[in-house]
DNA sequence: CATGATAATAGGAATCATTCTCACTAAATG
DNA sequence: CATTTAGTGAGAATGATTCCTATTATCATG
């Protein structure tokens, strides 16, 4: 986490956004937890040190600034994680039972296959494709 | 829509679920609208004929029974559409700007490529894959 | 075709994640 | 140091969705 801080700070100050103690802690917590996490999970992980209102605002700001990425789970709850320039490009395994989410990193060939699929499938639509999401649904070890 | 009704009715009665006027109308409306729609959209499309509470319950029941499928959009709202045994297997184009969602049907080869990716990527995890979701993000013609 | 058993409806209240408001505080800049 | 601007915290507000309860419709069959 200390190794990512300089780049984070640089990126934030470039946009006039301050890296305060609470935000530092939010990022560190998220980095320590590893996968996509909900605001509630982060909140309790930090022992309620950061009020939910502030936490949500910080998460939004950091996501906006490209430090974090957010995903809407199939349970309707938003989960946050470090952006891909920290974690590397990846996709998700999602437990259909409990909503827990884990990262999977595709091999270069797999990723190539995916981008090709995107191109092909968006080709004859009036849609400008900007990205893709490939999510594998299943049961985690706890719910199986 | 009349051509799908017999199979719907059969499927429902098999589980002791009644196909009432409101549910018939809900399904017909959804079929007419074509893509994934929110409860609010269906509600206003039917001229508020079906109260939201009833509509939500019906949508849940029908989804449970496998008549409909539901998806959580990136705007945190649930959208419903006819299940794949009516519409055929397909994936989604999602507008990152307004959340509107459209269907795309993969070719058999594309689908084969996808299922292979699922198998490969879930192979060395303690996760039992049951399905996948491949969503193409972009801008719809209205938001471009 | 009457009757009970059960499922469905309607309307409103309740939930819960998320967002907003606003007064207050901390940080950066000159 | 003063000023400006961003950030914080507490709670209220929002909005989609779910739950509750009394009432009504539907179904199977006697």
Image (cartoon, coloured by chain):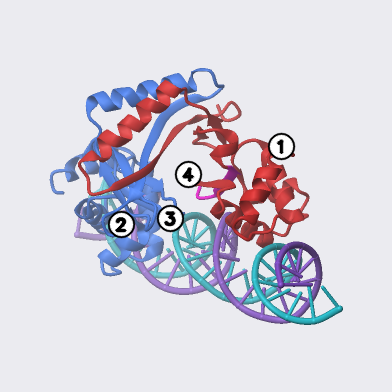
Chain colours: A red, B blue, C purple, D cyan
Chain of the residue where label 3 is placed in the rendered structure: B
| Residue under pointer 2 | B144
| Residue under pointer 3 | B77
**Are labels 2 and 4 assigned to the same chain?**
no
Percent coordinates x, y for residue B123 in the rendering: 49, 18
Which element carries disc 1, helix, strand or loop?
loop
The tag on residue A101 is: none
Question: What is the CA distance from the residue labelled 1 to the residue labelled 2?
Answer: 38 Å
Q: Residues within 10 Å of mark 2 (few under 14, many from 20)?
A: few
Which element carries disc 4, helix, strand or loop?
loop
**Are labels 4 and 1 assigned to the same chain?**
yes
Percent coordinates x, y for residue A36 in the rendering: 59, 40
Chain of the residue where label 4 is placed in the rendered structure: A
Residue A78 is covered by the magenta coloring: yes
Q: Residue at x 27, y 48 (%)?
A: A127
Dot 4 and dot 1 residues touching (CB under 8 Å):
no
The quarter of the picture where residue A17 lies is bottom right
| Residue under pointer 1 | A3
Left or right: A80 as drawn, with respect to B5: right
**Image depth: mark 4 or mark 1 in front:** 1
**Are labels 1 and 2 assigned to the same chain?**
no
For the C terminus of chain B, the quadrant is bottom left
């Amino acid at each position: 986490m200390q190794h990512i801080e300089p780049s984070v700070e640089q990126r934030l100050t470039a946009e006039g956004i301050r890296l305060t103690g609470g935000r530092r802690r939010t990022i560190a917590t998220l980095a320590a937890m590893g996968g996509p996490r909900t605001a509630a999970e982060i909140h309790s992980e930090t022992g309620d040190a950061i009020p939910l209102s502030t936490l949500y605002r910080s998460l939004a700001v950091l996501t906006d600034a490209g430090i974090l990425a957010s995903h809407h789970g199939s349970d309707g709850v938003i989960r946050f994680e470090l952006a891909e320039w920290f974690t590397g490009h990846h996709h998700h395994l999602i437990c259909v039972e409990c909503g827990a989410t884990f990262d999977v990193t595709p091999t270069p060939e797999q990723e190539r296959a995916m981008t090709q699929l995107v191109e092909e499938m968006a080709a004859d639509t009036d849609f400008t494709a900007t990205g893709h999401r490939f999510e594998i649904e299943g049961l985690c070890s706890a719910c199986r």
